[in-house]
Image: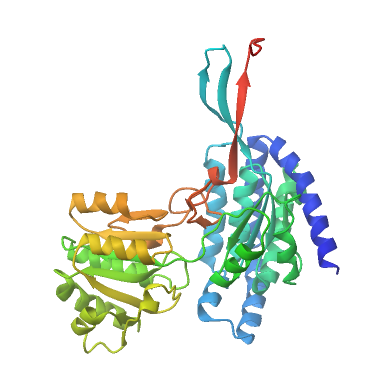
Amino acid sequence: MDIKQYMEQVGKQARVASRAMARADSAQRNRALLLIADAIEREADALRAANQQDLEAAKANGLAPAMLDRLALSDSAIKTMVEGLRQIVALPDPIGEISNMKFRPTGIQVGQMRVPLGVIGIIYEARPNVTVDAAGLCIKSGNATILRGGSEAIHCNRALAKLVKEGLAGAGLPEDGVQVVDTTDRAAVGALITMPQYVDVIVPRGGKGLIARLMEEATVPMIKHLDGICHVYIDAKADMQKALDIAFNAKCHRYGTCNTMETLLVHRAIAPQVLPELAKLYAAKEVELRADAEAHAILAGYAHLAQATEEDWATEYLAAILAVKVVGSLDEAIDHINTWSSKHTEAIVTEDYTDALRFLREVDSSSVMVNASTRFADGFEYGLGAEIGISNDKLHARGPVGLEGLTSLKYVVFGHGEVRK
């Protein structure tokens, strides 16, 4: 297969399909989503079998445990995919919405209309659920999409692609409205990110290495985040039980996700009480704690304890490893976060309203939380139906990217025969 020629064809088909997707009405797009959801439920056994093929091959190739976790398509993951599609159907359709209308002194009326971006290329690693999440959001927002999943998930992605095409055709939409790149050749990625004539935006979902490569090579604009170095800060005025629950969940709920806590900051006034109790919880999961000198002294005797280095503050572990630091004030905590964070998600545990508001205002990240686990930084949990990715950039979209992040605004003008003088 000539990869460049193949990707050119995929791009041309997507561009043509994008016009039909943009013209389709809300009922037609929702119909496609419901048909896809029904097909996934119907073919759950076939999807699990395809996923098992991928898992066996991945294990044989020595894929890391965190990546195997992402690759696995459990019964609950299938249920979540179906629920996500149906939740997207229930969301208001943003396309065609006109806002900010106002009359100008000349007599014309000016406003803005929400429109699809066009063709969205999505590149992701080892997560078959992204195939459905991304397809669903792109269909609902009137976009065509080109999906390039990781080679590890090729069998499952092919099976899902067949069901997505079935749903599109059943609703009278072009099957090329969602295309899954049917090759594991890495050259396909290089082609996809350098086709601005066919692709309007790239959304990468994967490891730091992948996104760093795309940032260097892409000529198509991207909605992205490079990594997820997320923090939880336990304030001096924290509720002890909330602190234990949140700090444990933020780290141990799942290790291989971008919204998992990687650094724990604890105020000096509460550290002697909270750190030993947290250590008991982390010990059950054999979490390695990389602690600064002050935290190290408090945690002496913990079985999996190491001395933190500066590199630990800048590391996304995606593993049972946690950096721990004792700070003397809210200011020190905020300064540490704004210095070392990847601007993804940060949380404060506190009963002090003033400290909570300062944290919300002054921490420069795409999601900032009070008394909640960082694991909630997710499009599904935010009520977006699903997410196509998370952006820690500041232009166009920031945080979990749902329907509105996949649209743009254009100015519309209503006149009554006015001419400019």
In-front residue for pair 347/226: 226
Q: Is residue 341 above or below residue 117?
A: below
Q: Position of residue 42 (x, y in %)?
A: 65, 58
Q: Position of residue 251 (x, y in %)?
A: 36, 71
**Does the image show residue 52?**
yes
Image quadrant occupied by the C terminus:
top right
Q: How many marks?
A: 0
Q: Is residue 64 above or below residue 51?
A: below
Image quadrant occupied by the N terminus:
bottom right
Indicate the quadrant where residue 289 lies. Answer: bottom left
Name the residue rendered at 54%, 81% in the picture: 64
Q: Is residue 110 above or below residue 79?
A: above
Q: Residue furthest front?
A: 421
Residue 164 falls left or right of residue 254: right
In-front residue for pair 7/220: 220
Q: Position of residue 270 (x, y in %)?
A: 15, 69
Q: Position of residue 196 (x, y in %)?
A: 72, 52
Name the residue rendered at 60%, 55% in the picture: 222
